[in-house]
Image (cartoon, rainbow, N blue to C red):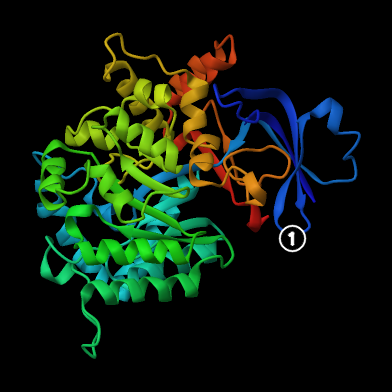
């Protein structure tokens, strides 16, 4: 058992309406094994209250620092680290000119392994301790990412990218070498083999991953849906309603579906643990479909602003009531830093689809990238599942140590914060990787 003394930030159990951050200026976080041997939070609260109770437990003191939950990135592309900051006129040209050429390189196991090492180091350096991640259409890219995450004891969810049409030939899923199975069938078999190899091992989870509906045939989409039915505890991830040209293309390819989003439902790909990136151009029927199936949106503000895709409608999502959380979407997204993502979400709220705009509270922004994103993933602790993204007792003890004096301007601003919202907002607006002094993975304690 270990304990940590610092200022503490965490979240009250979600009441279904608003996120409530909790803050203890001089606090104690106690970490120890649960019945399954996982390192989890045993207690959290005021130092004066808890120190006498846990006097026998070694304590590490971080004076002037804040301990907060590790961040949860709800949508990020492992193969696109080198694609950050590539200029393009929009989503589809960006894919063709930068993303697809880079992803071809992941056919090499050696390239995949070194990219995975850098990618996970960058996530951890920025305080991200759980991620739902795209790999490529090469099984070796999935193996490399899982292997590195396992080495770092990180909670990682990823899967083979499914696409059997409308992409460069050397990125498409391939038929089996013996010719018994076409590309659609073989990609599902490869996915199932990867599920059996990795899913549920240590802190790893598998995600069935159609890239987006236009790059999968009906046969591949149906195969993915059948696979999801056979493995109800794995995740599903894809993209939807990001760009108007993409939507028009999807409607041409799947004319029988009510909408682009409904295409996924028609193939059995919408349920709890299904996360769809972007979800910008929705109507209320789409929002109700998200709510009724338990699917969640990965809101990717820096990517949407960078590619000119549009604004996530926070007011519409809250009015109808479906789950969402924040995501970097590297490499369309412009930073691994959760602080940049939270600030981008604030901009999107201010400039979004409501006439007056929204002023998203600092507590709500921070919750969307921690406990809220974990809840959207089904990792909020319900039904006996592991809880991440928070520091309530029983949560896996992934946390970050923040230094609010990391830069001269940040130190100046946080010193005059008169309440919690001012402190959190100063870090959101002025923070970057320098604010993360240390990232602690629970199972490495």
Identify the residue at the far front of this view: 256
Give the left or right position of residue 90, taking residue 284 as reference: left
Q: Of residues 21 and 317, which is closer to you in this image?
A: 317
Q: Which residue is drawn at 48% across and 20% down?
A: 362
* Mark 1: secondary structure: loop
Quadrant housing the C terminus:
bottom right
Q: Of residues 155 and 18, which is closer to you in this image?
A: 18
Dividing the picture into quarters, in which one does residue 17 lie? top right
Give the left or right position of residue 215, taking residue 231 as reference: left
In percent of width and height, residue 277 lies at 32, 43
Q: How many labels does the image show?
A: 1
Give the left or right position of residue 341, taking residue 390 as reference: left
In percent of width and height, residue 196 lies at 48, 74
Compared with 160, 371 (above or below) is above
In percent of width and height, residue 311 lies at 26, 27
Q: Which residue is drawn at 14% across and 48% down?
A: 255
Q: Of residues 372 and 23, which is closer to you in this image?
A: 372
Q: Residues within 10 Å of mark 1 (few under 14, many from 20)?
A: few
For disc 1, the marked residue is 37
In percent of width and height, residue 365 lies at 46, 26
Identify the residue at the far bottom of this view: 178
Give the left or right position of residue 369, taking residue 105 as reference: right
Q: Can residue 41 be seen in this view?
A: yes
Q: Which residue is drawn at 39% across and 46% down?
A: 275
Compared with 48, 387 (above or below) is below
Q: Of residues 386 and 257, which is closer to you in this image?
A: 257
Q: Is residue 429 visible?
A: no
């Amino acid at each position: 058992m270990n304990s940590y003394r610092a200022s503490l930030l965490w979240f009250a159990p979600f009441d279904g309406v608003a996120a409530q951050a909790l803050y203890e200026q001089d606090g104690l976080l106690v970490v120890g094994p649960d019945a399954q041997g996982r390192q989890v939070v045993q207690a959290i609260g005021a130092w004066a209250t808890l120190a006498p109770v846990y006097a026998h437990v070694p304590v590490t003191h971080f004076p002037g620092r804040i301990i907060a939950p590790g961040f949860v990135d709800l949508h990020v592309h492992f193969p696109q680290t080198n694609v950050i900051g590539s200029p393009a006129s929009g989503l589809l040209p960006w894919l063709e000119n930068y993303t697809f050429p880079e992803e071809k390189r992941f056919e090499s196991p050696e390239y995949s392994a070194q990219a995975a090492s850098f990618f996970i180091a960058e996530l951890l350096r920025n305080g991200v301790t759980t991620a739902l991640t795209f790999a490529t259409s090469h099984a070796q890219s999935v193996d490399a990412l899982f292997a590195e995450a396992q080495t770092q004891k990180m909670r990682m969810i990823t899967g083979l990218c499914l696409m059997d049409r409308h992409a460069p030939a050397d990125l498409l899923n391939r038929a089996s070498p013996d010719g018994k199975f076409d590309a659609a069938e073989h990609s599902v078999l490869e996915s199932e083999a990867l599920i059996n190899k990795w899913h549920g091992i240590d802190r790893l989870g598998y995600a069935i991953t159609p890239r987006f509906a236009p790059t999968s045939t009906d046969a591949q989409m149906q195969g993915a849906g059948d696979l999801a039915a056979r493995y109800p505890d794995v995740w599903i991830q894809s993209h939807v309603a990001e760009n108007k040209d993409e939507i028009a293309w999807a409607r041409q390819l799947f004319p029988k579906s009510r909408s682009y989003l409904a295409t996924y439902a028609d193939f059995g790909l919408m349920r709890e643990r299904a996360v769809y990136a972007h979800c910008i151009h929705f109507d209320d029927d789409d929002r109700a479909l998200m709510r009724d199936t338990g699917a969640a949106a990965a809101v990717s503000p820096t990517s949407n602003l960078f590619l000119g895709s549009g604004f996530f409608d926070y007011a519409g999502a809250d009015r109808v009531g479906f789950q969402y959380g924040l995501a970097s979407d590297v490499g369309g997204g412009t930073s691994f830093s959760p602080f940049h993502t939270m600030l981008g979400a604030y901009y999107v709220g201010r400039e979004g689809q409501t006439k007056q705009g929204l002023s998203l509270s600092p507590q709500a922004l921070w919750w969307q990238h921690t406990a809220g994103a974990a809840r959207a993933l089904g990792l909020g602790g319900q039904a006996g599942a592991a809880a991440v993204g928070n520091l309530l007792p029983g949560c896996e003890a992934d946390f970050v140590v923040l230094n609010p004096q990391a830069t001269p301007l940040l130190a100046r601003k946080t010193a005059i914060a008169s309440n919690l919202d001012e402190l959190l907002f100063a870090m959101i607006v002025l923070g970057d990787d320098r604010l993360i002094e240390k990232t602690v993975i629970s199972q490495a304690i």
